[in-house]
Image (cartoon, helix red, strand yellow):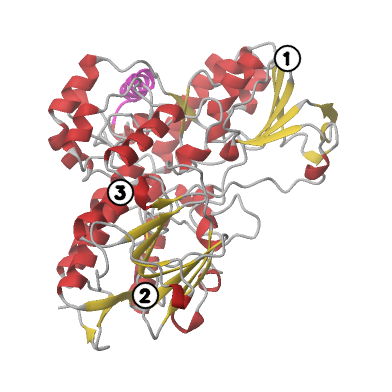
Amino acid sequence: MSGTGTQQGRPAQPDRAAGLAASYDVIIVGAGFGGMYMLHRLRALGLSARVLDVASDVGGTWYWNRYPGARCDVESMQYSFSFSKELQQTWSWSERFAGQPEILAYANHVADRFDLRRDIQLETRVTAAHFDEQTRRWTISTDRGEQFSAQFCVMATGCLSTAKLPEITGRDSYQGATYHTGYWPHEGVDFSGLKVAVIGTGSSAIQAIPVIAEQAAHLTVFQRTPNYSIPSRNGPMTPDYEGPWKSDYERRRAKARTMRTGILYGVENETWGLNNVSAMDVSPDERQRIYEERWAVGGTAFMAAFNDLITNEASNDTAAEFVRSKIRETVKDPETAEALCPHDYPIGTKRICIDTDYFETYNRPNVKLVDLRKTPIEAITPKGVRTTAGEQAFDAIVYATGFDAMTGTLMSIDIRGRDGVELREKWAAGPQTYLGLMCAELPNLFMITGPGSPSVLSNMIVSIEQHVDWLVDALAHMRANGIETIEPRADAEVSWGQHVNEAGHRTLYVKAASWYMGANVPGKPRMFMPYIGGVGVYRQECDDVAAKGYEGFVLTRGDERAVAAE
């Protein structure tokens, strides 16, 4: 690792003879929370770095996802950086669960507070990253015709950053306005007086539908798969809630890093996480009392009511039936209520949603639910949507159809490593990684919250900080020992993949056709992509690998001698 030319993240001079825009120690793809924190840490290490992002500003997923009602499902006091005590103490959230505008404002505040913008290049799409075995450097190409050279390339591209449109006949024939929740117009959309269709009932739809219903003259929701959703019980942030967090942040953050999801629940009485008993080990009355208590508190803490809701089908059934009973209590029309009740997958095995008045919205006279299992969509027409029951005309269609999750963005980039191996080819049967951090045959290419790590099953900022800190420690180790490349061994990658798969199959997650499994994308290999072992267990795994001299990795010095893990 050279570290030459510049320090503190200032770019080296352009290598005009080589036709390059500039040479850096590290190129980071993505200016969301992962990319920004990586840049901050690299500066402290004295490495030059450049962040490239296709967006017009920082924020990652919170830059793009501006749909009505967009909100984080992790409480604000925990969905925030922990690396700066001053940042923790001076930033104040206005709500228990922050909305998209406030989270984007926080991202911009972080960029400004730590002077990150001077090393971030926006409106730049990375199209390719190729490894040169002779120079042991990556060449990163962009849609601007630029090429950057870097010893290391960090993919901080996010897990939910490639929006997916549905494969419906005639989709492009529609003559009205169309929107996707993942690419919402920055100026917003006024649905007042319009007849609107929403296709999809996943997390973004569950947040957007109540807000759109308040504006639209009429809203029709097209649902293929009903979802379990828990009320958020969102409200203003109060001094009584914020104060104890800020006075005890260090201890609480440390504890959160040991939890399965990286989230503390039951903070007030320090139960911290799971109710450490099986749902089958308490009486029906006690079980009902606990579910009612969690339902009243709101948020994803509901899934921590018992310790076996994701592993024991009998226990899971009790939680699922409790939520179905709440849907039936809330929705006045029995037929609509039953259509909104999920039955064919365990609760929590698709992303558990939290909402504000989602089920209540179906009591509005201007809202109608169409059950696509009974009357499937045949086509999008120039005027609207045609199902087997007939055609309906709409002024606007909103596609809330999700993302090509976890792999979509990486697969859209032409990434080639040793001997020209292509990531697309390597992952043709599903993503293969070591620790969700790196891939064999792709030296010095890192992923932040990649497949095979807890990522989307966790508080993403906790996982981002853990990944970045581990990677920066690895780079410091390489620099101190004259090591130029790091790359997973193929057998370590296979072994980790088997462990991730086995861990997933010990749970109920594999019983759902979810985007965790890639099931929402036609032709995508079906495999459980995140690591279910939990944030705390995973952190220990990574720390043990590092403590053993980066066990499972091949580290090579500048003289081409491999350094074996001790």
- In the rendered image, residue 233, in percent from the top left (x then y), is placed at 39, 18
Amino acid type assigned to the residue bearing label 1 in the image: Gly
Q: Quarter-wise, where is residue 148 in the image?
A: bottom left
- In the rendered image, residue 481, in percent from the top left (x then y), is placed at 16, 76
Secondary structure of the residue carrying tag 3 is helix
- In the rendered image, residue 179, in percent from the top left (x then y), is placed at 66, 35
Name above or below for residue 366 compared with residue 443.
above
Q: Are marks 3 and 1 in contact (CB under 8 Å)?
A: no
Name above or below for residue 466 compared with residue 106.
below
Q: Mark 2 — residue?
A: 443
Front of the two marks 2 and 3: 3
Q: Nearer the viewer, residue 89 or 259?
A: 89
Q: Nearer the viewer, residue 21 or 156?
A: 21
Q: Mark 3 — residue?
A: 37
Where does the magenta region start and end? 282-297
Residue 479 within the magenta-colored segment of the rendering:
no
- Alpha carbons under labels 3 and 1: distance apart: 44 Å
Amino acid type assigned to the residue bearing label 3 in the image: Tyr
Q: Residues within 10 Å of mark 3 (few under 14, many from 20)?
A: many
Task: Classify residue 527 as left or right of residue 474.
Answer: right
Q: Mark 1 — residue?
A: 193
Amino acid type assigned to the residue bearing label 2 in the image: Pro
Q: Residues within 10 Å of mark 2 (few under 14, many from 20)?
A: many
